[in-house]
Amino acid sequence: MADSPFIVEVTAENFEEVVIQGSAEHLVLVDFWADWCAPCKMLLPVLSKLADEFNGQFVLAKVNSDQQQSLAQQYAVRSLPTVKFFKNGEIVDEFMGAQSEGQIRAMLDQHIIRESDHLHQQAMALQSEGKTDEAISLLEQANEIDPGRTVIIADLAGLLLQQGDLEKAETLIQSLPDSEKEKPEIASLLANLEFAQAADKLPDVSELEKTMAGDENNLQARYQYAMLKINAGDYETGMQQLLEIMKRDRKFEDDLGRKTLLKVFDMLGDDPVAAKYRRQMFNLLY
C-alpha cells in the first residue's frame, strides 16, 4: 500500500503540487484522516484498493488532519474521514464517513471516463441501429477489461435475454453482489429472466389458445398463456390474463395470479401500463 505510485502522503508543503496541479492531469481524492479515527482505518483499505485497481486514473492523497491542521481548516473539514474529489484545482465532489466500495465506485464513475465507457457507448449506438450481435461483442469486451460494472452487465444481460441466451444472461446477473441485485434495473432483469426461463418450457401460444377456448376455466393454460405473452413483450394481454385468474380463483396455485402480477410490475418499473394494471389489481383486492 505504502509503495503504490498512486497513493501519496500530502502535507502543506506538497499539497499544491500533488493536489492542485496534479488534478489538472487526473482526478485526485484527498483523504483527511487521523490515527485515532476508527472509520478512517476502515475506509483506507477500500480507497487504496481502488487507487491501485484504477491504475493511475486517480491519485489518492492522504492528509493526516492532526499533523496538517491548516489544510483541514482551509478545506472546512468538520468530521473524519472526509474525502474531497479535486479536478483542475477545484473540489467537484466529496463524502464524509466510511462509505462502501460500491458507493465510492459509483462516485468515481461520475468523474472518470474509462475505456469501457467508450465501448459501452459504441455498443448502445450499435444496438439503436439494430446491430445487436455487434453490440453484444463490444459489451463483452467492456466487461472483460473492466469487470463487475453494473451498468455494463445490465445492458449486456438485457441484450442476451433478447437473443434468447438465458444461461449466459443468468450467469452475468448472478455475478453481481446482492446489494446490486436490489437495484430496480437489476430486479427488472431478474424478473425478465424468470419469465423467459418459464416460457422456454411451455406449449406454444396456438395450442394454449385452443385449450382455453375449449375450457375457459383451465387456469393453468391461462397462466401459461399469460407467461408467453409477457415474455414476448405483450404485457397488457399477459396482465389481463393474470387479472382474470385472480377474478376466477384467488386460491389458484397459492394466489399465483397476484404474485405474478407483482413480478411484472417490478419488471416494468414506472411504465404507465404497469400503473394501469396495478390500479386494477388494487380495485380487485379491495
Image (spheres, helix red, strand yellow):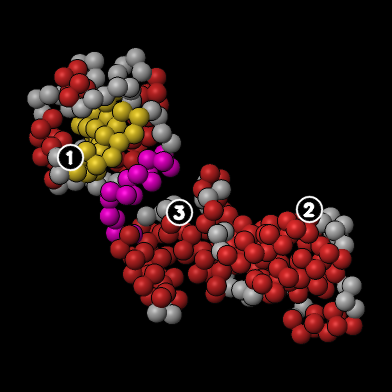
Q: Give the side of residue 251 with respect to residue 116, left or right.
A: right
When asked about the image quadrant of residue 96, the answer is top left
Point 81% across, 72% down: residue: 222
Return the residue at label 1.
Answer: 90
**Amino acid at pointer 3:** Thr
268 relative to 147, above or below: below
What amino acid type is highlighted by mark number 2? Answer: Tyr
Q: Earlier in the sequence, mark 1 or mark 3?
A: 1
Earlier in the chain: of badge 1 and badge 2, it is 1
- Mark 2 sits on what residue? 286
Element under disc 3:
helix
Is residue 109 inside the magenta stretch? yes
**Looking at the image, is 25 positioned above or below residue 281?**
above
Whole-angstrom CA distance, mark 1 to mark 3, is 29 Å
User: In the image, which is nearer the foreground, mark 2 or mark 3?
Assistant: 2
Task: Quickly name the residue at label 3.
Answer: 150
